[in-house]
Amino acid sequence: MPRRNPLWLRLPGSTSPSSSSTTEELRLAALSPYNNPNDETSSIPDSLEHSPAKTSDDGSEISRNNFNSPTSSPSRSPNKKVSWSLFDQVSLSGEEFLLPRRFEAIELIPGTSTRTTCASCSATDLLESEHVTIRKISLQDPATARKEYRNIILCRLLPHPNILPISEAYEVDSTLYTVSEQMDGRLSDIVEERLTHFVVAKITHQVLAAVAMMHQNGIAHGDLTLNTIYVNTDAELRLSSYGKSDDSSEHLEARFRDDLLSIGAIVSRFLMNEEEMFKFSKSRNPKDIDWRIVLEGSSDSGLLDFNARSLLFQLLEGRQTARDLLRHPYFKSFRAPQHQTVERKHTVVGQKTSDEVLDKLREELQRFNPFNMSEIML
């Protein structure tokens, strides 16, 4: 089990296999081909001969769900329909997912339903023995397709350790599936915690590092909130995506300032007791905050640290860039990661038509899976 910081105990932690032998069994089960000559089902079409197997060396089936009980009787998830395909159709709370056999679905993530165009589930990657999040997004809406293509191409061109990467992606019937690392929670889950300045500085530094890389490449995020930033129990942080801002170069400096203002609003929520200092509900617009009260500080606000007050003032003032703020004394314990830059023309997708975006998106998907999903046997 990973080490838990007491400050983060309210976050849902991930579990890991109970023994190295069980992990190895699961890895072999996912990698081995069907090779039992006595099994009448062992005759498999040539196109599927490399499908991940579900059996051990003696021909018995290995359960993917039971990590902690390797000696229990073999069983298959009741949600999964048996198939000889490379993919399985899985139903979770009425939501249908088409998943590669390397992934074992666990449950539908709360907040998603059949009435939305986007649904997510947690799953286990049997090859890597780790938990992942799988999202499915309808591409019927041109704006959604454009946003997803933008995120996928920026993940490839401008990878950053503090932005959630996409490890797998594929399309089925105008539905895009993406696989990414499973995080323990969002910043909104820990906003009520009384965190030390070291933890607040670590969180803020990671957000600024990701935003500085985007700004240096002429990209505004436009969607920095407590709910769009994920965090693990060790305070490792990931932005959920590269944002939803358009690619226009108009008013770019103003949008950069809006990103810094959003970061300032997030930081203030961690540094102060909201109930005593602001007397407003969580849903109130951060721009309505009386920032003079914030900057004055008090014995109740948590802003006795001079460097914390100085950083917050500079975030709200908007005269410094994100890259400059990374050198603020409040972050003396941290070092910003190196990042690359690309020509702006490679990151602009706003000029393409809806059909062109879909074509380009499918070209990007070929980088993940070189096979044609329309030929997959279900």
Image (cartoon, grey):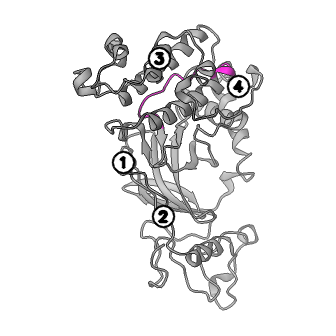
The residue under label 4 is which amino acid type? Thr
Q: In this rendering, which labeled residue sits more in front, label 1 or label 2?
A: 2
Q: Residue at x 58, y 13 (%)?
A: 320
Label 4 SS: loop
- Crowd tier of the residue under label 4, counting other residues whose Cα lies within 10 Å: few below 14, some 14–19, many 20 or above: some
Lower position in the chain sequence, tag 3 or tag 4: 3
The one of 207 and 31 positioned closer to us in this rendering: 207
Main secondary structure type of the part rendered in magenta: loop
Residue at the disc numbered 4: 347
Residue contact between numbered discs 4 and 2, judged by CB atoms under 8 Å: no
Which residue corresponds to the image point at 75% horizontal and 26% vertical from the top-left? 341
User: Looking at the picture, which amino acid does disc 1 mark?
Assistant: Pro
Which label belongs to residue 363? none
Query: Compared to 236, does 221 lie above or below?
Result: above
220 magenta-colored:
yes
Q: Which residue is mark 3?
A: 310
Mark 2 highlights which residue?
Answer: 1
Disc 3 to disc 4: CB gap under 8 Å? no
Q: Which portion, as a residue range, is magenta?
A: 215-229
Q: List the residue tagged with mark 1.
A: 110
Q: Amino acid at mark 3?
A: Ser
